[in-house]
């Protein structure tokens, strides 16, 4: 019974957006085991504090087990939980980092390039242009930004982005 | 684009009254920009320089404007091509002078036209910064690099482009930057393929 409850818990931690599914599973669990749903929900909410706190402090599986023992959980259950923790930790920590605030996050980039063949001022031309569309997340909505670059501007842009990437690599 | 007519060429002969070759040069240059034919000040100045009536000055400016735009549009780059436009009985030395002046100005006019053609907002400037995120509300300690890119874009000058440039700042994670560089690299490869043909 404890094991299946732990499983429901970790499933939710791995997919935090699935709140409806989580609540449904908790209610089902309550029904199957003859408990009332309300108190169980409260209990589970408190249980979630343990992994959240552990993620915040980047605790190892050993530390998590110690904490659980201190909290009064018995050896077997603490061991099971900490094993599950080490299995899922990489995904969980990536999720936590991914939730970190990002301002104006670049979500997508589309591009096309072509040749300007002529204009109303010049009958025959052959200049290459590049058009970029950047999709930026602003809060809950996205905003599209369109721009055009000449060839030299494109090469400059590429060069700057390569420098930025090199700078980022320095830190890993 | 207005066509070159006989009236235009007869107005051009007014340049014979110009005090110097430089005056002719100056008048050609002044007549090129878009608003030239309507400009009161230019007409006044021209009528003063050539000692002609205001109306005649305007006709001359209009003629120079149409001629310069014609040369630009058809990309006439050799003296023979330009001389061929003039009618047979046109004053010979004046014809040569005007041709020379037009050829002198053509490269500048061409660059100007290309820089001012309609386009999507142009990327004017780009700056970036790499930060290291060390903590957040969900994780006490971390070391995640992130990149902030600031782009200044300006509307094309012909689309009411005296607007100040607008700017946009975006944040990219390392994966996003890698993906973006992938895309830009593909563009570069395709550009080289096109240029190589």
Image: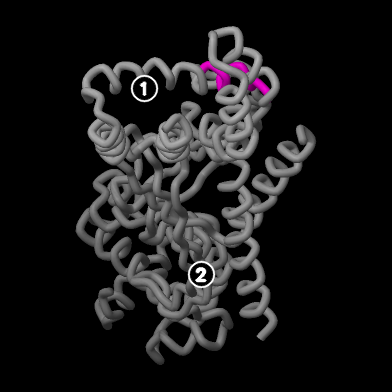
Could you say whether the residue bearing mark 2 is in a helix, strand or loop? helix
Q: In the image, is residue A151 above or below residue A67?
A: below
Q: CA distance from mark 2 to mark 1?
A: 84 Å
Image quadrant where residue A88 sits? top right
Could you say whether the residue bearing mark 1 is in a helix, strand or loop? helix
Of marks 2 and 1, the one in the foreground: 1
Counting from the top left corner in percent of width and height, residue A171 is at 76, 32
Q: Nearer the viewer, residue A164 or A117?
A: A164
Q: In the image, is residue B142 above or below residue A90?
A: above
Within 10 Å of disc 1 (Cα), the crowding (few <14, some 14-19, many 20+) is: some
Q: Which residue is mark 1?
A: A44
Q: Which mark is residue A111?
A: none
Q: In the image, is residue A98 above or below residue B8?
A: above
Counting from the top left corner in percent of width and height, residue B94 is at 48, 74
Classify residue A29 as left or right of residue B109. Answer: left
Q: Which residue is mark 2?
A: B102
Within 10 Å of disc 2 (Cα), the crowding (few <14, some 14-19, many 20+) is: many
Query: Is residue A59 on the magenta stretch?
Result: yes
- Subunit that carries the residue with mark 1: A
Q: Which residue range is magenta in the image?
A: A53-60
Residue at horizontal 51 percent and vertical 23 percent from the top: A51
Classify residue A63 as left or right of residue A141. Answer: right
């Amino acid at each position: 019974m404890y094991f299946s409850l732990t499983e429901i818990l970790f499933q939710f931690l791995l997919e935090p957006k699935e709140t409806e599914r989580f609540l449904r599973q908790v209610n089902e669990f309550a029904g199957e085991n003859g408990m009332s749903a309300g108190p169980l929900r409260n209990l589970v909410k408190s249980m979630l504090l343990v992994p959240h706190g552990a993620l915040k402090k980047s605790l190892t599986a050993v530390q998590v087990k110690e904490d659980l023992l201190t909290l009064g959980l018995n050896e077997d259950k603490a061991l099971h939980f900490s094993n599950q923790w080490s299995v899922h930790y990489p995904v969980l920590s990536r999720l936590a980092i991914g939730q970190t605030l990002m301002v104006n996050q670049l979500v997508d980039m589309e591009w096309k390039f072509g040749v300007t063949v002529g204009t109303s001022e010049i009958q025959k031309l052959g200049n290459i242009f590049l058009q970029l569309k950047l999709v930026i997340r602003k809060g809950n909505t996205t905003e599209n930004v369109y721009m055009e670059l000449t060839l030299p501007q494109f090469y400059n842009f590429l060069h700057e982005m390569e420098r930025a990437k090199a700078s980022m690599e320095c830190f890993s | 684009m207005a066509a070159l007519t006989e009236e235009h060429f007869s107005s051009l002969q007014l340049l014979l009254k110009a005090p110097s070759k430089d005056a002719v040069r100056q008048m050609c240059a002044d007549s090129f920009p878009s608003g030239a034919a309507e400009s009161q000040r230019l007409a006044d100045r021209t009528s003063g320089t050539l000692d002609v009536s205001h109306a005649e000055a305007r006709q001359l400016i209009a003629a120079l404007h149409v001629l310069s735009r014609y040369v630009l549009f058809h990309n006439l780059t050799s003296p023979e091509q330009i001389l061929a436009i003039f009618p047979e009985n046109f004053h010979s030395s004046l014809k040569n002078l005007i041709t020379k002046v037009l050829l002198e100005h053509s490269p500048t006019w061409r660059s100007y036209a290309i820089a001012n053609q309609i386009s999507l907002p142009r990327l004017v400037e780009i700056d970036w910064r790499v930060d290291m995120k060390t903590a957040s509300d969900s994780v006490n300690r971390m070391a995640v690099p992130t990149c902030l890119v600031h782009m200044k874009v300006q509307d094309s000058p012909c689309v009411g482009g005296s607007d100040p440039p607008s700017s946009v700042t975006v944040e990219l994670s390392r994966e996003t930057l890698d993906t973006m560089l992938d895309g830009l690299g593909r563009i570069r490869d395709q550009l080289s393929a096109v240029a190589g043909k």
